[in-house]
Amino acid sequence: MSTLARRHILVRRDAGLYAYERTLARSGFAPVAGADEAGRGACAGPLVVGAAVLAPGKRGEVPGLADSKLLTPAARERAYDQVIARAVAWSVIIVPPDEVDRVGLHRSNIIAMRRALARLDPAPSYVLTDGFPVTGLGVPGLAMWKGDQVAACIAAASVIAKVTRDRIMCELHEQWPYYGFDAHKGYVTDEHQQALTAYGPSPVHRRSYANVARVVSLGDEGWKGEPDL
């Protein structure tokens, strides 16, 4: 069980994906927003944060909704369309890679979550986040372990963030095709690292990440140009 707010509201973690929002709403905390990010572990591309408030009752139940990482790309796209259609409010914040480098990953994530939640209208009365707390919201909140698997609003935010970011990475692939962004979406794979070593980091690589910094330290400070075909 999890305890919410100061009223010691108990929610069974196996009570279903919508139990947290409904329990909070019955206790006077409505609307409830969820926030989640995509791209923390990627060494290229933006960090993307989504936030969502789902409609109450059956109208807010999203067919096929789950943690975005557990869905196929096609299922994520379908869930994304349903989330956008059924959300009372939603927002997305895109943090460029150079800002992640300058500000730092965790701080960038927190700032982006605050911005995404601040854009919601109506403003939430309670906030659920995945993994770590976000302070300074002016409303109570709860950081949930694997929240995108147990709270619908976090899962919805996860889908928004993931689909948005995947689309961006496919667009970046058109500009920088030699890294395979359309396949690995900027995360570290053997193929990605080989391309990074061969061509040097692109303008969308995060130079604060160890594997990119290592290539830069060897003198490969930037894009070397198109390979000889």
Image (cartoon, rainbow, N blue to C red):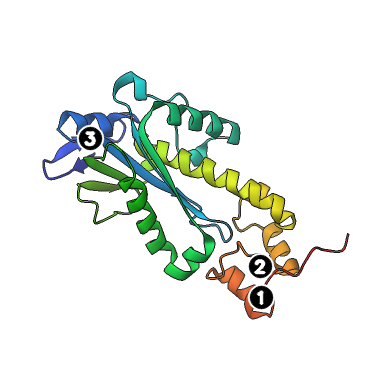
Considering only order in the chain, which callout, 3 or 2, is on the residue closer to the N terminus?
A: 3
Residue 129 visible in the shown view: no
Q: Quadrant of the N terminus?
A: top left
In the picture of the structure, the residue carrying the numbered disc 2 is 201
Label ID, residue 8: none
Tell me: 163 left or right of 218.
Answer: left
Cα–Cα gap, marks 2 and 3? 47 Å
What kind of element bears circle 1? loop
| Residue drawn at (67%, 63%) of the image | 193
3 vs 1, front mark: 1
| Residue drawn at (66%, 75%) of the image | 221
Residue 29, given in percent of the width and then of the height, sits at: 18, 36
Contact (CB < 8 A) between labels 1 and 2?
yes
What kind of element bears circle 2? loop
Tell me: 149 left or right of 209.
Answer: left
2 vs 3, front mark: 2
In the picture of the structure, the residue carrying the numbered disc 1 is 221
Most extreme residue toward the left is 7
Number of dots carrying numbers: 3
10 Å neighbourhood of mark 1: few (<14), some, or many (≥20)? some
Which residue type does callout 3 highlight? Val
Which residue type does callout 2 highlight? Pro
Contact (CB < 8 A) between labels 3 and 1?
no
Label ID, residue 11: 3
Question: Residue 206 sits in which quadrant?
Answer: bottom right
Cα–Cα gap, marks 1 and 2? 7 Å
Cα–Cα gap, marks 3 and 1? 51 Å
Tell me: 194 left or right of 26.
Answer: right
Q: Quadrant of the C terminus?
A: bottom right
Question: Is 194 situated above or below 27?
Answer: below
| Residue drawn at (62%, 75%) of the image | 214
